[in-house]
Image: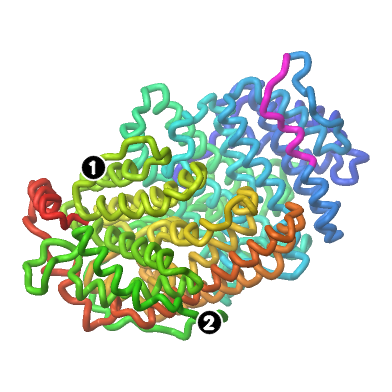
């Protein structure tokens, strides 16, 4: 915890106000959930005074009321629905709550117009808080905060479902779902209110701001899991706790799991700091933020820092989890019960507490040890020696419950993609020509993207299979080019310019002009976009374009890490790998024919995203296992899941491979679990027609084909075999043209003029 906690001077006023407000909302005696001594012991006013040290008394009172409400909701839902395993009642309860957050404001005397009459303390509290908060906030903030509030509420059903079937989630599933149900993204919205720094809409949804919110959320949630482990596992029967998740996944002791969680907290805090220092300045320039907008973003980042430090300090003092302290208990501190020792990494205050140093100011008493251990993790991420000789990639037995069926049009697609690539100028015209592009014809034949497309879409007709094959070809071609050319010369500006042009070549409105393609990569994308987007409705084109933009933007993220020689944080890697692999792009090709039979909100639902993310992670990690030698030994890459695990756990290749294999296995099991147990609930929740249900059942089968086809392609293509790895783009000795300082412009001119720039 690199930033010390500070205390808001209006603490006592917030304590008194929160007691009065909770009583007015009927949350105390008579609620069956809390009495005043519970509220005093939990001391949410202390939490808010620590997490918002600079806000006014009025703002602190309101923020404290929000936290009283959200914790009361958590306990109320636990008592009424989790303990009774009443999913149907819980869903009906949750479905009413968004009605208490209307987007449109009415007159000051009628702010609750159209809002239902509250029937319980949770509804009454939400209606009151929304009425008092939103007049000061923009429509964009209201939309984002209402969405995060709905996620916080609705994902309680996911936790309830896991308790019902006695299921411990896997680590990736847990991190994703914890953000929604854990409340920290919701807290980030209140940071905007408390600091008076609303995010400009032009950057609110950008990657740097998303990373700040996600890293903040993950560190907050994982720290909470350390404190709440005993209460949740022994008293509540809770299976959604990060320590328990790693304890189960790694098959290790509780202490080892706690240490691993602590390491992950440190990694997420370091990712937060890196994003502030290395990504925000570029974002300000790219989006043209004025000084006021930039200042608001920085104030927001500082507010998240304050929350992180203050939340840690509150956990050590509140009795909600383990300390027996809080405002309602004798004294302000107490000795922790826990047998776990929380040391060094990211939780210095806990290390001090375990050592017996109690009272205010202890967060820095173990700082030297913390900085040493946290520094070693940061050092490992930035001192990896590239091009280490690792030998052929080791291939375990991959779990694959689905079989591959190939399209009968495979042979024709193989021939057609070679002709198409020549027409686009993507290949060297003949063997023996000095290497100035990315691939020659022999390389394209070895890579055999038609085989992959034939497995992904076994029912595709000839034209559809050609289109799928050529999209795979284009995406891999461009993905090879970015690190090999822009990465070698650290030409970040050139890469960003190229990415902007690619986006411009995909106009959503057919009447909008597109630039004239200047090189092979642009010609190929323009051709693919015209053939793919022409029959689509405008909304579908916009969605499809976003998947391509997401993939090309992710290559810039890879380039930034390559330039900084930084192995990614494991959570950031998993989430960005889906984009760099093109998962959304290829999956969206499967959905093009679904039309309006399935409401778009179904595809945005939590279970559907879990299904797709589980499939994507399996495929991405599968690729990392096959490409390990290619990327580590020959290309000097830092973007490989096995390497990320090696670096994070400071372990050898076989150990990291075993962890990755276990994660692949758990993601496959999750895919099957969601398909069998959660999607039927989605069908019922959305009251889908028989036709829509059949479409979604078909989509699940398409994803099964997607998974099986990707494994078959990796086994049979020759892209990753050791005998073909020398002298490919990115390997030592490979050169695409002039190299060295100041030569990138000349090289790009040469490639563009020859039609071979990828």
Query: How far from the left and from the top, in percent, is residue 634?
Result: 22, 72
- Decide whether residue 485 is among the magenta residues: no
Give the residue drawn at x 65%, y 46%. 151
- Closest to the observer, 410 or 112: 410
Judging by the rendered image, the residue that carries numbered circle 2 is 403
- Marks 2 and 1, the one that precedes in the sequence: 2
**Which disc is residue 210 wearing?**
none
Query: How far from the left and from the top, in percent, is residue 236?
Result: 77, 60
Q: How is the image coloured?
A: rainbow
Element marked by disc 2: loop
- Closest to the observer, 42 or 618: 618
Judging by the rendered image, the residue that carries numbered circle 1 is 516
Q: Is residue 284 above or below residue 32?
A: above
The C terminus is located in which quarter? Answer: bottom left
Q: Is residue 77 above or below residue 37?
A: below
Q: CA distance from mark 2 to mark 1?
A: 43 Å
Query: How far from the left and from the top, in percent, is residue 638?
Result: 31, 63
- Closest to the observer, 385 or 18: 385
In the visual, does 499 lie left or right of 403? left
- Chain part drawn in magenta: 96-107
- Decide whether residue 102 is among the magenta residues: yes
Q: Is residue 33 above or below residue 339?
A: above
Query: How far from the left and from the top, in percent, is residue 99?
Result: 76, 35
Residue 245 seen anywhere in this rendered image of the structure: no
Closer mark to the observer between disc 2 and disc 1: 1
Q: Is residue 333 above or below residue 419?
A: above
């Amino acid at each position: 915890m690199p930033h010390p906690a500070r205390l808001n001077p209006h603490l006592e006023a917030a304590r008194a106000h929160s007691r009065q407000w909770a009583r007015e909302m009927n949350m105390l005696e008579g609620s069956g959930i809390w009495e005043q001594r519970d509220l005093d012991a939990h001391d949410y006013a202390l939490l808010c005074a620590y997490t918002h040290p600079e806000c006014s008394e009025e703002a602190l009172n309101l923020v404290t009321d929000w936290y009283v409400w959200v914790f009361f909701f958590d306990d109320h839902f636990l008592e009424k629905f989790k303990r009774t395993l009443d999913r149907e009642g819980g869903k009906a309860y949750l479905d009413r709550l968004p009605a208490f957050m209307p987007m449109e404001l009415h007159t000051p005397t009628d702010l609750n117009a159209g809002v239902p009459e509250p029937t319980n303390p949770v509804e009454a509290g939400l209606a009151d808080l929304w009425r008092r908060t939103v007049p000061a906030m923009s429509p964009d903030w209201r939309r984002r905060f209402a969405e995060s509030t709905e996620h916080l509420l609705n994902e309680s059903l996911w936790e309830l479902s896991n308790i019902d079937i006695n299921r411990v989630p896997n680590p990736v599933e847990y991190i994703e779902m914890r953000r929604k149900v854990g409340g920290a993204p919701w807290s980030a919205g209140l940071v905007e209110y408390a600091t008076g720094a609303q995010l400009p809409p032009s950057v609110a949804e950008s990657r740097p701001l998303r990373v700040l919110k996600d890293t903040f959320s993950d560190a907050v949630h994982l720290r909470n899991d350390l404190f709440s482990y005993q209460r949740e596992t022994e008293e509540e029967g809770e299976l959604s706790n990060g320590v328990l998740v790693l304890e189960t996944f790694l098959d290790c002791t509780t202490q080892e799991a706690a240490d691993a969680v602590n390491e992950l907290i440190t990694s997420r805090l370091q990712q937060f700091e890196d994003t502030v220092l290395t990504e925000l300045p570029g974002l300000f320039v790219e989006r043209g933020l004025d000084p006021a907008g930039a200042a608001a973003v920085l104030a927001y980042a500082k507010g998240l820092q304050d929350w992180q430090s203050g939340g840690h300090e509150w956990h050590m003092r509140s009795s909600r989890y383990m300390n027996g302290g809080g405002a309602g208990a004798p004294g302000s501190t107490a000795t922790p019960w826990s047998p776990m020792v929380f040391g060094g990494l990211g939780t210095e205050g806990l290390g001090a507490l375990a050592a017996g140093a109690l009272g205010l100011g202890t967060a820095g008493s173990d700082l030297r040890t913390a900085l040493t251990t946290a520094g070693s993790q940061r050092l490992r991420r930035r001192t990896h020696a590239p091009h280490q000789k690792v030998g052929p990639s080791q291939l375990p037995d991959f779990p694959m419950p689905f079989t591959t069926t190939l399209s009968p049009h495979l042979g024709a697609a193989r021939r057609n993609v070679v002709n198409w690539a020549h027409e686009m100028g993507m290949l060297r015209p003949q063997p023996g020509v000095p290497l100035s592009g990315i691939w020659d014809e022999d390389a394209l034949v070895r890579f055999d993207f038609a085989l992959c497309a034939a497995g992904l879409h076994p029912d595709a007709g000839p034209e559809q299979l050609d289109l799928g094959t050529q999209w795979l070809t284009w995406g891999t071609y461009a993905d090879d080019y970015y690190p090999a050319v822009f990465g070698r010369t650290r030409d970040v500006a050139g890469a960003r310019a190229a990415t902007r042009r690619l986006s411009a070549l995909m106009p959503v409105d057919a009447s909008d002009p597109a630039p004239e393609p200047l090189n092979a990569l642009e010609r190929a994308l323009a051709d693919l976009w015209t053939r793919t987007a022409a029959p689509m409705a405008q909304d579908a084109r916009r969605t499809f374009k976003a998947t391509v933009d997401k993939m090309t933007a992710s290559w810039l993220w890879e380039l930034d890490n390559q330039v900084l020689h930084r192995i990614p944080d494991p959570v950031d890697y998993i989430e960005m790998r889906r984009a760099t692999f093109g998962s959304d792009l290829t999956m969206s090709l499967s959905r093009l024919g679904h039309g309006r039979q399935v409401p778009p909100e179904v595809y945005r639902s939590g279970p559907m995203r879990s299904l797709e993310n589980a499939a994507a992670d399996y495929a991405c990690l599968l690729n990392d296992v096959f490409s390990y030698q290619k990327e580590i030994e020959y290309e000097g890459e830092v973007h490989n899941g096995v390497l990320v695990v090696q670096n994070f756990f400071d372990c050898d290749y076989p150990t990291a491979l075993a962890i990755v294999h276990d994660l692949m296995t758990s993601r496959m099991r999750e895919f099957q679990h969601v398909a069998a147990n959660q999607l039927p609930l989605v069908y019922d929740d959305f009251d889908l027609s028989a036709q829509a249900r059949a479409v979604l059942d078909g989509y699940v089968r398409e994803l099964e084909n997607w998974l099986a086809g990707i494994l078959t392609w990796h086994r049979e293509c020759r892209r990753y075999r050791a005998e073909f790895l020398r002298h490919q783009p990115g390997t030592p000795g490979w050169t695409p043209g002039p190299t060295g300082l100041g030569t990138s412009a000349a090289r790009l001119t040469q490639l563009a003029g020859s039609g071979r720039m990828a």
